[in-house]
């Protein structure tokens, strides 16, 4: 498999908002994203944007642009429906939840532990809804799976050590 373009993750997702410019500002304030690129069109509409969180990247787009496909919608425009949830690992899930709540995120589920047993992992996380209805999961890894002798895992050894 060839590597992705420089400075791009293997997979990037896009989310759409009725007011993408305001959403970008809010996502940075509430969740800690950083703007890497923002291309504005007429009336402050967003033609393209890239927000980063650590090595992760999302694109935030404007729904309702005449020259863009009409299937790009904010959950607000389709009765709150979501076809995806975004999951982001953070360093301190309690502090992150408090920051999101203070910025106006609706906390759908308070921070709680999910433990899949020692063959898998343990995380602590919460779910929230942003200002236009996208659902986000923020998690903190508490414990990685115990490596099995002779078996390979999907975690690199440096990631396992970093997260233990």
Image (spheres, rainbow, N blue to C red):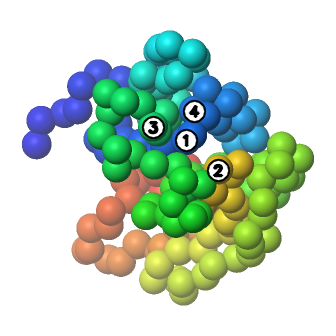
Residue that appears at 46% across and 39% down: 63
Give the alpha-carbon distance from disc 3 to disc 2, as whole Å: 14 Å
Label 2: which secondary element: loop
Q: Residues within 10 Å of mark 4 (few under 14, many from 20)?
A: many
Label annotation for residue 17: 1
Residue that mark 4 sits on: 20
Of the image marks 4 and 2, the number of the one nearer the N terminus? 4
Identify which residue, 5 or 66, lies in the foreground: 66
Q: In which image quadrant can residue 24 be found?
A: top right
State which tag comes first along the sequence, 1 or 2. Answer: 1
Say the numbered circle drawn on residue 132.
Answer: 2
Estimate the x, y position of residue 52 in percent, counting from the top left. Answer: 53, 31
Q: CA distance from mark 1 to mark 3?
A: 9 Å
First reached walking from the N terminus: tag 1 or tag 3: 1
Mark 3 surroundings: few (<14), some (14-19) or many (≥20) residues within 10 A:
some
| Res. 104 in view | yes
Marks 4/3 in contact by CB < 8 Å: the verdict is: no
Task: From the viewer's perspective, tell me whether residue 144 is left or right of residue 7.
Answer: right
Which residue bears the numbered disc 3?
64
Left or right: where 11 falls relative to 61? left
What is the C-alpha distance between the residues marked 1 and 2?
A: 7 Å
Specify whether 14 is left or right of 125.
Answer: left
């Amino acid at each position: 498999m060839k590597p992705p373009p420089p400075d791009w993750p293997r997979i990037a997702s896009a989310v759409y908002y009725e007011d993408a410019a305001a959403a970008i500002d809010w996502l940075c304030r509430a969740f800690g994203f950083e703007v890497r690129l923002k291309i504005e069109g007429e009336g402050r509409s967003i033609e393209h944007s890239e927000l980063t969180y650590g090595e992760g990247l999302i694109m935030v787009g404007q729904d309702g642009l005449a020259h863009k496909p009409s299937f790009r919608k904010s959950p607000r425009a389709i009765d709150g429906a979501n076809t995806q949830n975004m999951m982001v690992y953070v360093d301190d899930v309690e502090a992150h939840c408090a920051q999101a709540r203070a910025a106006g995120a609706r906390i759908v589920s308070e921070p709680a532990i999910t433990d899949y047993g020692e063959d898998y992992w343990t995380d602590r996380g919460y779910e929230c809804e942003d200002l236009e209805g996208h659902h986000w999961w923020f998690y903190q890894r508490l414990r990685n799976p115990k490596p099995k002798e002779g078996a390979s895992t999907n975690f690199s050894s440096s990631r396992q050590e970093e997260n233990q």
